[in-house]
Amino acid sequence: MQQLKDLMSRDVQVISPDATIREAAEHMREGDFGMMPVGEDDRMIGTISDRDIAIRAVAEGKDAGTKVRDVMSEGIAWAYEDDSVEQAAMIMSERQVRRLPVVDRDKRLVGIVALGDFAVESSEIRPAAQALSEISRPS
């Protein structure tokens, strides 16, 4: 059974809730990723995605100086680093997310896994196909 720690990216950047959405977008562009965990006082309090910026900021006419905390998604979904690919795919499917922060047993952020990682890295792609079909279904 393949565990998330075997295929997650350990290069995960965390952004402050007091950063601006312009800063978040710049980090996403430079790192070529679409979601960042939002951290405050050494804990995750949410996530911000390119979609959050587009839907909750740009579409509502907010400016680039808007704080991350004003458009981030709360109620963060995550998985443990020793969880299986299947467990993570189930969480992603249930929560309708394509990227998932990964924590150790002390709940410290240690990485991030994207849906595409399952298909690329895992010899067992059925969980990714299932999760993708569930995530892609309109809610």
Image (cartoon, grey):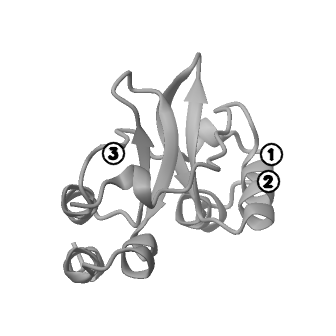
| Quarter-of-image position of residue 117 | bottom left
Label 2 sits on a secondary structure element that is helix
| Quarter-of-image position of residue 68 | top right
Distance (Cα) linking label 3 and label 2: 24 Å
Q: Which corner quadrant holds the C terminus?
A: bottom left
Among numbered discs 1 and 2, the one appearing first in the sequence: 2
Relative image position of residue 50 (x, y in whole percent) = 60, 64
The residue beneath circle 2 is 22
Among numbered discs 1 and 3, the one appearing first in the sequence: 1
The residue beneath circle 1 is 65
Relative image position of residue 60 (x, y in whole percent) = 60, 61
Amino acid at dot 2: Arg
Of 90 and 105, the residue lying toward us: 105
Q: Would you say 26 lies left or right of 138 here? A: right
Label 1 sits on a secondary structure element that is loop
For disc 1, the neighbor class at 10 Å (few under 14, some 14 to 19, many from 20) is: few
| Quarter-of-image position of residue 29 | bottom right
Amino acid at dot 1: Gly
For disc 2, the neighbor class at 10 Å (few under 14, some 14 to 19, many from 20) is: some
- Tell me the residue at 25%/64% (across/down): 89
Among numbered discs 3 and 2, the one appearing first in the sequence: 2
Is any atom of residue 100 visible in this view? no
Q: Nearer the viewer, mark 3 or mark 2?
A: 3
Q: Would you say 110 lies left or right of 34 here? A: left
Amino acid at dot 3: Ala
- Where 53 falls versus 81 (above or below)? below
The residue beneath circle 3 is 77
Relative image position of residue 93 (x, y in whole percent) = 22, 66
Residues under numbered marks 1 and 2 in contact, where contact means CB atoms less than 8 Å apart: yes
For disc 3, the neighbor class at 10 Å (few under 14, some 14 to 19, many from 20) is: some
Is any atom of residue 133 visible in this view? yes
